[in-house]
Image: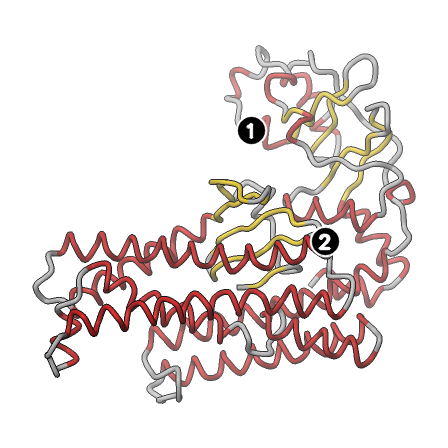
């Protein structure tokens, strides 16, 4: 479970599904979460049948699904703890997203001080460890009651009810989540605590991020090596052995290494774009289309003659009505292009990522990256389109000012 700069397009892009709001914080799950939820439920059902040979398959499956949902509920609590503490320090929180590797708090900027970073990071593992200890205590009490005078632990476990079985599984797994997140591998919570310590010692956020990211990459590759060793039969202390477990550990290690590297590149990008406004990089000449133009005319007179893939749609008074992109046109059958207007096919303005000419370039670029779009209309205070911000133009600006930085960003 991580937070902050691990945020991806999931919250604002098309890959997430919102399912609730807690304390004003939006909850969502990425489609990749469905895969891990299915895999965990399937694995738990098989495990519960081994624990309880007398259970029906239906009982095992239902218990496994409930266990999976409760586990991810505890993940939400872990991330919610991060988010609430971050907000206490004045850091905006966009939401919490469940995804393949657990959960991520989409925190919009880094904590302002090392103390804020430490408190924001450590509260998540402490929450998971507290939940784990509480459930382990409850599960142990249930096991003692169910076992009675039975001395055989295997037989005692077989006698557990579905509720008692949930306690016996959820307790240790939450404890494991809390301990694992304390590994000093950035951007895990332990790595963020390490960065805060380095930040306090060096008085430089940039230096602390560089060292924490390097350590995080190293830890990630170490997990990859351990995972591959397990897959080939090595018995690794604490992790065990096995093909599936080894590949999963290697996958987690690769993800951590990549996330640490991305965080460092993001910090370099912040540094290069600091103080640069959108107005300096945007294209002021806007090729706009009217909302009443039919798609056939749009294709023949505009799209076919331009290397751009999207155009703003503006009303006669210059207000932004929406954006029409090549993908929007493709969704309409070719034989209907003459009868379908741009207004009918476009993405309306309410669903667009927009920028202001006075915005800092980095703050305008981040929504583009989150939503995974290549351009955004630049709109002034009166709602009029005054330019277009393209990701390619931002990269070109970086190339002109720092070629090495552009190469790191493009990787």
Q: Residue furthest left?
A: 54
Residue closer to the observer: 76 or 163: 163
The residue depicted at 85 percent of the width and 56 percent of the height is: 273
Where residue 317 appears, x then y in whole percent? Answer: 83, 13
Q: How many marks?
A: 2
Q: Are marks 1 and 2 in contact (CB under 8 Å)?
A: no
Picture quadrant of residue 84: bottom right
Reading the image, the residue beneath label 1 is 330
The image quadrant of residue 319 is top right
Residue plotted at (39% across, 82% down): 239
Residue depicted at 87% across the width and 37% down the height: 357
Q: Is residue 210 left or right of residue 145?
A: right
Q: Position of residue 314 (x, y in %)?
A: 77, 19
Which image quadrant is residue 383 in?
top right
Q: Nearer the viewer, residue 161 or 331?
A: 161
- In the image, taking residue 389 as reference, residue 224 lies left or right, namely left
Badge 1 crowding class, 10 Å Cα cut-off, few under 14, some 14 to 19, many 20 or more, is few
Q: Position of residue 252 (x, y in %)?
A: 49, 70
Relative to residue 148, is residue 344 depicted above or below? above
Label 2 secondary element: loop
Give the secondary structure at mark 1.
helix
Q: Which residue is mark 2?
A: 91
């Amino acid at each position: 479970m991580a937070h902050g700069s691990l945020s991806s397009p999931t919250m604002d892009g098309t890959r997430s599904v919102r399912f609730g709001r807690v304390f004003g914080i939006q909850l969502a799950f990425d489609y990749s979460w469905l895969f891990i939820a299915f895999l965990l439920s399937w694995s738990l059902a098989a495990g519960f049948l081994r624990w309880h040979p007398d259970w029906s398959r239906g009982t095992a499956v239902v218990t496994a699904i409930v266990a999976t949902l409760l586990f991810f509920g505890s993940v939400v609590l872990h991330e919610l703890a991060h988010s609430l503490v971050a907000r206490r320090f004045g850091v905006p929180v966009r939401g919490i997203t469940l995804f393949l590797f657990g959960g991520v708090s989409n925190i919009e900027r880094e904590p302002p001080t090392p103390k804020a970073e430490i408190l924001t990071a450590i509260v998540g593992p402490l929450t998971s460890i507290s939940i784990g200890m509480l459930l382990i205590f409850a599960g142990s009490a249930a096991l003692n009651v169910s076992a009675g005078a039975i001395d055989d632990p295997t037989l005692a476990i077989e006698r557990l009810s579905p509720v008692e079985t949930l306690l016996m599984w959820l307790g240790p797994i939450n404890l494991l989540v809390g301990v694992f997140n304390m590994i000093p591998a950035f951007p895990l919570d332990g790595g963020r605590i390490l960065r805060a310590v380095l930040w306090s010692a060096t008085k430089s956020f940039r230096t602390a991020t560089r060292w924490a990211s390097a350590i995080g990459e190293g830890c990630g590759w170490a997990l990859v090596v351990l995972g591959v060793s397990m897959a080939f039969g090595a018995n690794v202390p604490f992790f065990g052995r096995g093909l599936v477990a080894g590949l999963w550990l290697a996958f987690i290690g690769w993800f951590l290494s990549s996330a640490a590297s991305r965080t460092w590149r993001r910090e370099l990008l912040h540094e290069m774009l600091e103080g640069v406004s959108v107005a300096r990089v945007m294209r002021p000449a806007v090729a706009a289309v009217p909302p009443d133009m039919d798609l056939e005319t749009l294709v023949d007179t505009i799209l076919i003659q331009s290397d751009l893939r999207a155009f703003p749609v503006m009303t006669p008074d210059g207000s932004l009505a929406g954006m029409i992109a090549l993908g929007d046109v493709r969704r309409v059958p070719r034989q209907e292009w003459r009868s379908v207007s741009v207004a009918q096919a476009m993405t309306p303005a309410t669903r667009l990522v927009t920028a202001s000419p006075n915005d800092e370039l980095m703050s305008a670029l981040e929504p583009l990256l989150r939503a995974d779009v290549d351009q955004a209309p630049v709109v002034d205070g009166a709602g009029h389109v005054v330019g277009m911000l393209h990701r390619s133009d931002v990269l070109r600006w970086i190339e002109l000012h720092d070629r090495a930085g552009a190469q790191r960003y493009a990787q």
